[in-house]
Amino acid sequence: MGELGSGPGAAAVGVVRPAHERARRAVASPCPAPLAPAREPLLFAELPALRTLPFQPLAHLPTPVEPALACAAYLGRDDVWMKRDDLVSPLYGGNKVRRYELLLAAALATGRRRVLTVGGTGSTQVTATALFGRALGLGVRAVAFEQPLTRFVRRALLANAAAAAELVPGGGYFGAFARTVLELLRARDTSFVAPGASSPLANLGYVDALFELDLQVRAGLVPRPDVIVLPTGSAGTLAGLLAGAWYLDWPLEIVGVAVATRAACNRATVGLVAWRTRRLLARHAPALGRRRHAPCFRLFHGALGRGYGHPTPDAVAALPEIERLTGAPGEVTYSAKALVGARAVCRDPRYRRKHILLWNTLSSTLPPAPESARALLPPALARLLDGEPVA
Ligand SMILES: Cc1ncc(COP(=O)(O)O)c(C=O)c1O
């Protein structure tokens, strides 16, 4: 990134790097990671004009779809289904993987060797960028803004460090914004993945995901959902699914359980991402006729509490349910709040006769997070690990 002291001759001219930086470089060689079998996205087969887009397989598909029976008592219904995108990759699952098949492919196609991103200290986006970027031979740098320390955040910080990501302490939101601008000005040979990774291009990954669900519906594996519930922040997942529903002419309602404050996640912000995603899809589908249905979304703000990453009593109470459902620990930023929202939907009389599907967006595969990785963190981030987790 053209940083002072980062060039190959730095040692020769006596530049002394901080200890965490020297340690990080020692583990920074690419690891032989399992990626994914080659495949053509269903979306490309449907719209061949999209075949010109760079594509890097990362996902193991299709992800299972199964009854969410393990938390039937919690939800108050035994007819809810779950789409297991937590299992989308043995390296790291969750809702960034399908998007990164396009986004990291685009980064690779530019020939740049580095990626800069920004997210919370427990951001799954930073973890996904660190792991998949490394597996693809890209150097990853991430500005991290602080969020309440939970066991999950602790794990994520250590995992990101262990994956040799260069983490840059950003402080609060404004500090992280300023730091990111600075990093962008200095960056060389670098592609930028914006917070949330919800560009229209990336979101096509979730159009493809709805096509995959459509095949599972047609195969009789799951009833066609009337309602999909999922956690929503930057809205790329919701936008992709909604655009897919528009294309397939499904009368679908998506309930996005807001995981960020209304300033960041509201009808206008989500609507804009959805509109831009659908516009990109429509541009490649000029022959598509009039749609009979108008799939729609609604936001549920009742699970958020004080804001992004803040635990709520309801979310903490939902944690064991997540573990029962997926076999992996949940966390309070996304999965537990999504389940709180799903329960509200399931118990709402308006949805009594509706087929409800919960889209699981949090990885069940936990990347290695050894305590020793603490030495790879810059001191300002390492110090955060000393706090008492709030959940
Ligand atoms: C596990 C998980 N679920 C849901 C979300 C929100 O997804 P989106 O930003 O597409 O709204 C995120 C965002 O990072 C996430 O990590």
Image (cartoon, rainbow, N blue to C red):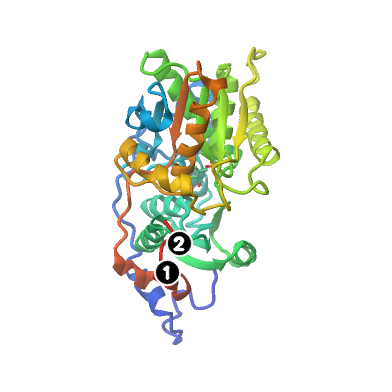
The x and y percentages for residue 51 are 51, 30
Q: Is residue 205 visible?
A: no
Query: In the displayed structure, would residue 217 be above or below residue 375?
Result: above
Q: Amino acid at mark 2?
A: Leu
Q: Residue at x 52, y 54 (%)?
A: 310
Report which residue position mark 2 lands on: 149
Crowding at mark 1 (Cα within 10 Å: few <14, some 14-19, many 20+): few
Does the image show residue 371? yes
Image quarter of the C terminus: bottom left
Q: Which residue sits at x=47%, y=23%? A: 356
Mark 2 and mark 1 in contact? Answer it, CB < 8 Å.
yes
Q: Nearer the viewer, residue 312 or 308?
A: 312
Residue under the image location 47 percent in, 65 percent down? 167
The residue singled out by tag 1 in the image is: 387
As rendered, which of 83 and 200 lies closer to the eye? 83
Q: Secondary structure at mark 1?
A: loop
